[in-house]
Image (spheres, helix red, strand yellow):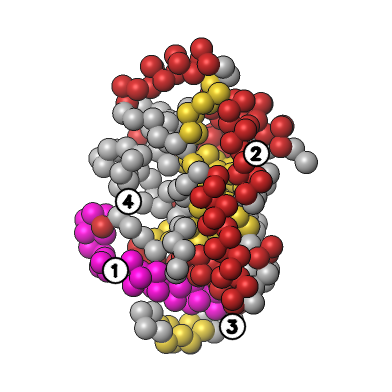
Amino acid sequence: MKFGIHNSSWLDCPDPAEAFEAVRAKAQWAENRGFVWFSVMDHMIQIPRVGAPDEPVLEGWTVLAGLAAVTGRIRLATLCTAVGYRNPAHLAKIAASVDLISRGRLTLGIGAGFFEDEYRQYGWEFPLQPATRIRQMEEAVQLILKMWTEPRTTFRGRYFHVEDAILEPKPVQKPRPPVMIAGGGEKMTLRAVACLADACNIVDGDATEVRHKLAVLRGHCDAVGRDYDTIEKTRIQPWLLARDAVALAAKRERLAARGPLRGFVGTVSEAIDLIGQYQDAGIDLLINADRRNDVETRELFASDVMPHFAS
């Protein structure tokens, strides 16, 4: 089992002008403590269940470029980029540039998009049918993969097109950077993973549900002739840890004033038990969605949890 951190809140420091310095320090700390993955939200405003809509939020790809220059080993990603936020040819160019800056450490995390209010605020068209957005995502990934690998790309799809497009320099990773498709929709999203992606990201559900989702993914792989084992299986979840029950009760009381505590809230031993269940279900990479910016949780992962799963 490998571990990562996802930066979903930009409130590590009280001054928004210091937000990048805070995320830089977090990414460097994670790299030095054995985490293999660091991702950031790709949203223009804060999303529901994480924080208030008027919280400060930095633009995700700009941040990744900055982190690429100040880290050296950890894999960097957006988790995830909604297909409607950028022309996919432009996104292919942005991602190739970040891969170059990082010397080949980028994973392109992409999804169909869900946050209608954000689309409306920024003037993007929001197709109401999820199936339409998923088809847009599939077509965008097809286009991006072509632009990363072909000398010139002509692509005429239902939603996107380019004519004899040049993308130079190509990404550092060969044959190209990995693509993660986020979401657990069983009919379309997991089928898109089987057809197009190098990694999936399961967002919701307990260990039993995760096991079920991965069984569905295996079925889609069998149907399209894809080797299921070539896909990295990841799980993102908010975690709040304390060393024992007494410390956990104190943490619950301290943090309750900031709203409901979502995700896993428990002791180190309880966390180890649940992570073992995820591992048995087939998860390769567990990502802590660091919504509360809780230093103790990150420290306990590094000192007490991750060594338990070291191979």
The span shown in magenta is: 117-146
Residue type for callout 1: Gln
* Residue assigned mark 3: 151
Task: Sort mark 3 into few (<14), some (14-19) or many (20+) by Cα contacts within 10 Å.
Answer: few
Q: Which mark is residue 129?
A: 1
Residue 170 position in % (x across, y down) = 60, 71
Nearest to N terminus: mark 4 or mark 1: 4
- Judging by the rendered image, the residue that carries numbered circle 4 is 44
Residue 22 can be seen in this image: no
| Type of secondary structure dominating the magenta stretch | helix
Q: Which mark is residue 55?
A: none
User: Is residue 266 or residue 307 the one in the foreground?
Assistant: 266
Q: Residue at x 60, y 44 (%)?
A: 278
For the residues bearing labels 3 and 4, Cβ distance under 8 angstroms: no
Residue tagged 2: 276
Q: Earlier in the sequence, mark 3 or mark 4?
A: 4
Q: Earlier in the sequence, mark 4 or mark 2?
A: 4
Q: Amino acid at mark 2?
A: Gly
When the figure is inspected, residue 189 is found, relative to residue 80, above or below; the finding is: below
Image coordinates of residue 214 in percent, x first then y, are: 57, 58
Q: Gap in Å between the C-alphas at discs 3 and 4?
A: 33 Å
Task: Give the vertical position of 62 relative to 140 (above or below).
Answer: above
Residues at marks 1 and 3, CA–CA distance in whole angstroms: 35 Å
SS at mark 1?
loop
Structural distance between the alpha carbons of marks 4 and 2? 35 Å
User: The residue tagged with tag 4: helix, strand or loop?
Assistant: loop
